[in-house]
Amino acid sequence: MKNLFSKAALSVAVLAMTSGMAGAAGKGISDGVVKIGVLTDMSGVYSTLGGKGTQVAVEMAVKDFGGKVLGKPIQVIGADHQNKADIASAKAREWIDNEKVDMITGLLNSGCALAVQKLASDKKKITMNTGAASTDLTNKACTPYGIHYVYDTYALGKVTAEAVVPSGGKSWYFITADYAFGHSLEANTTKFVTKLGGKVLGSVRHPLSTADFSSYLLQAQSSGAQIIGLANAGGDTTNAIKQAREFGIDKKGQRLVGLLIFDTDIKSLGLNVAQGMQFTSGFYWDRDAATRAFAKRFYAIHKAMPTMDQAGAYSATMNYLKAVKAAGTDDSDAVMAKLKSMNISDFFAVNGKIRADGRMVHDMYLMEVKKPSESKGEWDLLKIVKTVPASDAFMPLSESTCSLVSK
């Protein structure tokens, strides 16, 4: 009788375990499709460094993955948030509620990214931000479903300041984009400038998509600072640099330092204007054979070399799909668990790992713009001066204010 009871109990336990496993596997792919949304600046000041190129990169990743995961099709949709947080939120809500989007990527513009990350998290959907920079995304605004994939204002400010201040750039004045991204970039860079013995003499803030920088440049010039730090990006950065050259600011002993620069910015400026500038990047297309192979394929479609936002979007999408396959489902909790357990190593990320706060840490690079005489082709624009290990580039978890981080 005792043996019969034991066998019955064992049968029940096995059945329960099998049922649990079947239930997990039974989640499979919701709605019969994995849908990825690319929400970014498609027409504004950041469209060249992100925009359609980011969607191209995501579509490349889907095609390279095979177009299906767990036997179900993968779809990509895209939209322009116009650098407006309310439009970004409305589109993300529509996608999640009506289009059944499983993951949103791109999110170029910190105001848009912060709004969408919160909304998506409330609905238990994953965001893999490749374009925005504010460290708030993995600090006070962190969520269980938010991933900050490519770069942030901590890494940008730290690596650049550590190159500029010791080489004589002791006094700084900032020209800053007046929204979350610019504020965060100025604050983080200031912290490292002062830590290294430098000082900040002041700052001035400008609206996004500013055409005329003359008044801001004159204020920076009159400060007497050795370094004019540009805490902006895209068209705002290139406009400021071009106009500063026209005013001859660089010939009067002051030096311009762009704190977020992309290959496309250097292409727009030209090597005659940009030569010698140093900045921080998370990716360069000509780093090695693997980056060049990806860049060649991307160029064939987009007719430009990939920026770090665009290359990062390919990597984020590919690793998301790998996590879905490994989890056996597109359930966000299961996929996030897989993503945070993975070592991310591909043409984009070296020593990549997604931490508890959602920050994907990886090696970063101090770049220098080549002289015209050093360039051997249209996109031969940069050289890597220094590789900064992931552990040195990004904010340590000990400094994090993210509620998901155990202290």
Image (cartoon, rainbow, N blue to C red):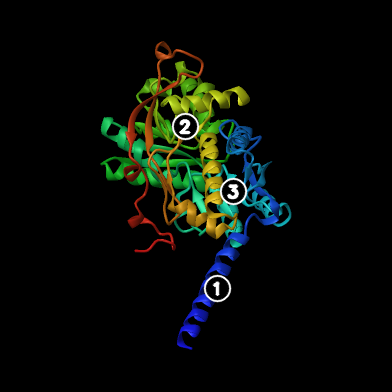
Foreground of the two, 104 or 187:
104
Sequence-wise, the earlier of marks 3 and 1 is 1
x and y percentages locating residue 128 in the rendered image: 54, 48
Give, as a three-letter code, the residue at label 3: Cys
Q: Is residue 21 above or below residue 367?
A: below
Q: Is residue 263 above or below residue 64?
A: above
For mark 2, what is the residue? 261
**Is residue 46 something one can see in this rendering?**
no
Residue type pointed to by label 1: Ala
Q: Is residue 293 above or below residue 179?
A: above
Between residues 253 and 164, which one lies in front from this camera angle? 164
Tell us which disc is closer to us: 3 or 1. 1
Q: CA distance from mark 3 to mark 2?
A: 20 Å
Mark 3 touches mark 1? (CB < 8 Å): no
Which residue corresponds to mark 1?
16
Q: Nearer the viewer, mark 2 or mark 1?
A: 1
- Of pointers 3 and 2, the one earlier in the residue sequence: 3
Report crowding for label 2: few under 14, some 14 to 19, many 20 or more residues within 10 A (C-alpha): many
| CA gap, disc 2 and disc 1 | 56 Å
Residue 334, labelled with which disc? none
Residue on which disc 3 sits: 112
At 54% from the left and 77% from the top, the residue drawn is: 12
Return the x and y of residue 203 as percentages of the image width and height.
43, 41
Q: Mark 2: which amino acid? A: Ile
Q: Residue at left 46%, top 28%?
A: 291
Q: Position of residue 73 (x, y in %)?
A: 67, 45
